[in-house]
Amino acid sequence: MTRILPKLIVLLFFALAACESAEERAERYYQSGLALLEAGDVDRALVEFRNVFAANPRHAKARLAYADAQRERGLIADAYGQYVRLIETDPDNVEALVALSEIAILSSGWEDAETYGRAVGPLAPEDDRVITVNAMLDYRDAVMTEEPAAVPAKVAGDVLARDPNSTIARKIVIDHAIMQGEIDSALETVEAGLDIDPNQPELHVIRVGLLSEAGDPAKTQAALEQMAAQFPENEQVQQELIAWYISRNDLSAAETYLRALAAADDASETEKLTVVDFLRQTQGMEAARAELDRLIATEDDNSSYRALHATLAFAQGDQDAAVAEMEGIIAENEASDSVRDFKILLAQMLESQGNTAQAQTYVTEVLAEDAGHIDALKMQAGWAIADDDPNAAIIVLRQALAEAPRDISLITLLGTAHERAGDHDLAGERYALAVEISNQGVEPSLRHANFLLSQDRLEAAEAVISSALSVAPQNIELLAKMGELQLRQGEWNKVTRIIWQLRAMDNSLAKDVADRTELALLNRQRRFDETRVFLEEMIADGGTSMAAKAQLIEAQIRAGRVDDARAFLSEELEKAPEDPTLRFLQADVHVLLDDPAAGEAGYRELLASFPENELVLGRLFGLLVAQDRQEDADAVLDDVLADAPDAMMANLVKASRLEAIGDFDGAIAILENLYANDSSNLVVANNLASMITTRRDDDESVQRAYAIAARMRGTDVPQFQDTLGWIAYRQGNFDEALTYLEPAARGLPDDALTHYHLGLTYLALERPGDARNALEKAITLGEGQDLPQMKRAGELLAELP
């Protein structure tokens, strides 16, 4: 008997369970869940509620309890979904509608807030939560339509008096007080909220802003410090406090705070390196390296600190030692994410030294171990762009973006690749996306604006800078760029306001920018006498740059006051006889006063000291050519190139001279070398592509020229249009060629080769009349020039009917 009793009990249990309905089973699970909630066992309670749903998906009380529990735990998305499911089966459920309205309001989901808040209003008009939700909706409507918002604000204030825990009512009361300029009242309401629950970051932020607005720096700092203590894991709060210390020039407090973060038991490597970076920015490289020395000596795992130490040493010019240190760190450690990062750092060092082959070896090793290593992919893409293979770069960058879709430098590099490929619309989209992701960051905004400027889209560029200034209204770079844009558009009053804003900053850099902008404004308006007076006043105030003095001399000369210019120049040279700017101006004045020999001597002395100075070279070379002394001019070029073989201007002029005497291979070789050093230079790219297509006939050369010139598609620069048009012609794309060559001929009315290219294109399109006109003009313009194309033009004209 005793042996079969357990079996009977089990059978009896299952029999009873089988008799239990789904509704009864759901209710049993629900009651169990409530008991577990009461006991604080939320996880097990939620399991019981899910059992309820399995037995009875329409159990409203369980659904509400589940949603409330998830909302209490901060799992808002899940809670929201559960409330929505609840009102699908019970559309008049006040608790669910209130919860949905509150969540929508606090997350700025105003469309849902309207839907649920207005629906619950008639269902429970006396419920303070319902009153508050509808007061917020009414308040927002009033603010958006610029109508009086006092009534809903009063309603919210009454609710807050009855229920000090009402977050939404408090938001309304605070916002209305701020809108009315009642800073003390707003602060009082904020403080009351923080007394109830100090763990409200939004109230802390509002308090800091209000105290700052009230002009109370001591209380502002105390509020920031309290917020940082309340939210020790919030990096943004930490950055705000550090920025505050720096803005108050309290670098000691900033350093103390950063060191406290770095000294915590759970401090990360990043927090320790933040101290290093702060020292670098505020005390210089030596202080940063000293801190790294301390970390290297005290930390067991010091590879990252050694790597940064090597990076700083490299930046200070101790490059060989830095490279050796990095190689040592890599050799001492087994393969890991950190070691792969070290290899990329070393690759970047080697690349900057011109050792691209070794840098590529390290990048290849890294990608063999980690095909998605972002910085390695960036370097690989950069090389592809430099090698005129932007499509390969685009493939690599898309792979990287799959891993890091919001990496601003990746997005920017992709924009560069599209730009090199000639896809300017796609490039603009990428630059705009970088601006958006950075929240109108300064660097991305300036880059996008400059890209738009290159397309002569001034209004679009101004819109980009305006948005960036709404985030960083005191940024000097942005203000300078805005001044430049408004100058180009002739917006004189707006430029004047920018100047006033800069001068109000009490900052030496801002003052310099304001001075430059005001000078540019006066010159643009051709107010030359005022320009001279302004410069004289600047110099009389003292502390003026040499550039301003140079501008004054130029202004005096432009105004015909040569004697004044010479007298001022002599005075300044007595104070600074070796100043190169003054010496250059002295040579200019000699030439202007018809003493070319003295001017030439001055230019030559300067060029001996500054062989890469393009302005001096241009002046001397032009002076010699104007005197029919081409051999002397060529000798100057050769001397400069002997001292500075990579000098850009000298090489470009040399290439032009070689082309003029028929040494086309020599000219191309110079341009190829310049292009290898900097493939982003548009002038070099255009000259090289033009030379290749003009002087070489093989398909490989034409394809290479196309790859070089692709970035110039859509250009309005006539020289670039001619190059693109001729390449299109050589590829047999005659209609495309015409779209470039016709505007190029209008922009270069005196260039024989441009009209020759246009004439051949007209012939290919079977337009003999237009071809005759273009070829005849080319021959006329080419008279006296040693251009073999003109012989061919004559032959083609003879064949025309």
Image (cartoon, rainbow, N blue to C red):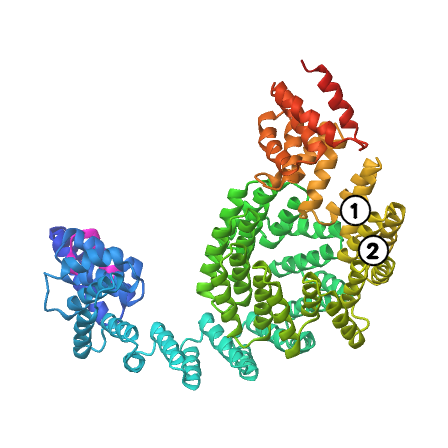
> Residue visible at 56% across and 75% down?
507
The picture places residue 393, in percent across and down from the top left corner, at 60, 44
- How far separated are the C-alphas under marks 1 and 2? 14 Å
Question: Mark 2 highlights which residue?
Answer: 644
Element at badge 1? helix
User: Going 53% across and 50% down the picture, which residue do you hit?
Assistant: 452
Q: Of the residues tagged 1 and 2, which is closer to the observer? A: 1
Residue type pointed to by label 1: Val
| Count of residue discs | 2
Other residues around mark 1 within 10 Å, as few (<14) / some (14–19) / many (≥20): some
Q: Amino acid at mark 2?
A: Ala
In the rendered image, residue 235, in percent from the top left (x then y), is placed at 47, 71
Q: Is residue 670 above or below residue 527?
A: above
Q: Quadrant of the C terminus?
A: top right
Q: Give x and y (percent) for residue 161.
A: 18, 79
Residue, disc 1: 653
What span is in magenta? 45-62
Pick whichever of labels 1 and 2 is earlier in the sequence.
2
Decide: marks 1, 2 in contact (CB < 8 A)? no
Q: Predominant secondary structure in magenta?
A: helix
The residue located at (80%, 66%) in the rendering is 583
Question: Which corner quadrant of the image does residue 702 belong to?
Answer: top right
Q: Is residue 593 magenta?
A: no
Which quarter shows the N terminus?
A: bottom left
Residue 720 position within the rendered picture, expressed as x and y whole percent measured from the top left:
65, 39
**Mark 2 residue element:** loop
Looking at the picture, tell me which residue is in the foreground, 168 or 626: 626
